[in-house]
Image (cartoon, grey):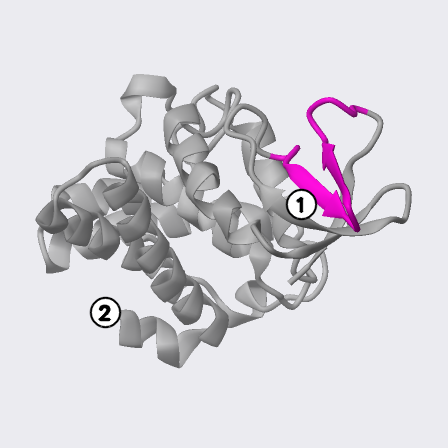
Amino acid sequence: MLLMLNNKDDYTYHHCVHVGMISYFIAKWLGHSESEALDIGKAGYLHDIGKSKIDTAILNKPSKLTDEEFEEMKRHTVYGYDIIRTSIHNDDYALTALQHHERLNGHGYPLKKVSQQIHPIAKIVAVADVYSAMITTRVYQKKRDLLVVLKEIHRISFGELDAKIAHTFILHMIPNFIGKKVILNDQRTGSIIMTNPVDYFRPLVQIGEEFIDLSKHTSIEIADILL
C-alpha cells in the first residue's frame, strides 16, 4: 500500500514512514506492549494512504491552496478510511486514517470530533504527524528548528492534541538536547547540562564556569540550539 504513495509522492511516502516510526516510539513511551506499539506504528505508516487519490498538482503545489483545493486535500482522510476498510479490513487503521486531523476542541476535520470521540491511536498518530510535518522541508515550507517545533507541540497540547501523549513525546525528546551548544537571547553561548522536568524549555545552561538555571531567570531564553 505504501508503494502506492511512493509512486505518487516522494514526500508523503517518507512522511508516512517517519510517522509510523515515531508513533511506535510514542506508544512504547506510553507503556504499550511491543505488539501494541507495532500495531500503532503500522497505523501511523498508513495514516496518509488516502493521499494516493489526491491529484499530484494539489499535493505538490508550492503556493497556498485554494479553498476548493484545500477541501479536496482534506478528503484524503476519508479516502484513506475507505481504502483501508476495503483492502485490509482493519478498523483501527481505518479510523486512524480518518481521524488523525481531528482535534480535541472539535476544530479538526473531517467530522469535527471532540475528545473521547477520537480513536486513541489517532491521537498518538496526530502528535507524530504534526512533528514530522513541521520538522521536514516541503515545497511550501522550510523545516523548523527542533526546539521551535517542540514548543509548538507543547502549545497546541492544550486543547488540540492529547496533552498526555504530547508531553510524553516532548519529555523523551528533550534529553537529546543535553550537551548541545545553545545561543541565548542575550547572545551568550553555552551548553545544556541538565533538563528541567517541570519546565521542559528552561534547562540548566553552563557558560564558562557559570551555571544558569533558566527556570529562575525568566528574561533569558534559548534562542537557538546548535545541533
Q: Local crowd at mark 1 within 10 Å, few (<14), some, or many (≥20)?
A: some
- Residue closest to the eye, 40 or 206: 206
Residue type at tag 1: Val
Name the quadrant of the C terminus. Answer: bottom right
- Residue closest to the eye, 224 or 47: 224
Q: Which residue is mark 2?
A: 1
Q: Local crowd at mark 2 within 10 Å, few (<14), some, or many (≥20)?
A: few
Q: Is residue 96 left or right of residue 71?
A: left
Task: Spot the residue most to the bottom.
Answer: 7
Using the rendered image of the protein, determine whether residue 112 is visible from the camera's viewpoint.
no
Tell me if residue 212 is in the magenta stretch: yes
Residue beneath the point at 62% across and 37% down: 151
Please tell me whether residue 107 is drawn above or below residue 18 in the rendered image. above
Which quadrant would residue 194 be assigned to in this image? top right
Q: Which residue is mark 1?
A: 148
Residue 38 position, x and y percent, is 17, 54
How far apart are labels 2 and 1 at the CA level?
Answer: 33 Å
Numbered range of the magenta stretch:
201-218
Q: Secondary structure at mark 1?
A: helix
Residue beneath the point at 30% across and 74% down: 4
Using the rendered image of the protein, determine whether residue 82 is visible from the camera's viewpoint.
yes
Please tell me whether residue 209 is drawn above or below residue 154 in the rendered image. below
Q: Is residue 169 left or right of residue 209?
A: left
Residue beneath the point at 66% across and 32% down: 202
Name the quadrant of the N terminus. Answer: bottom left
- Residue closest to the eye, 208 or 123: 208
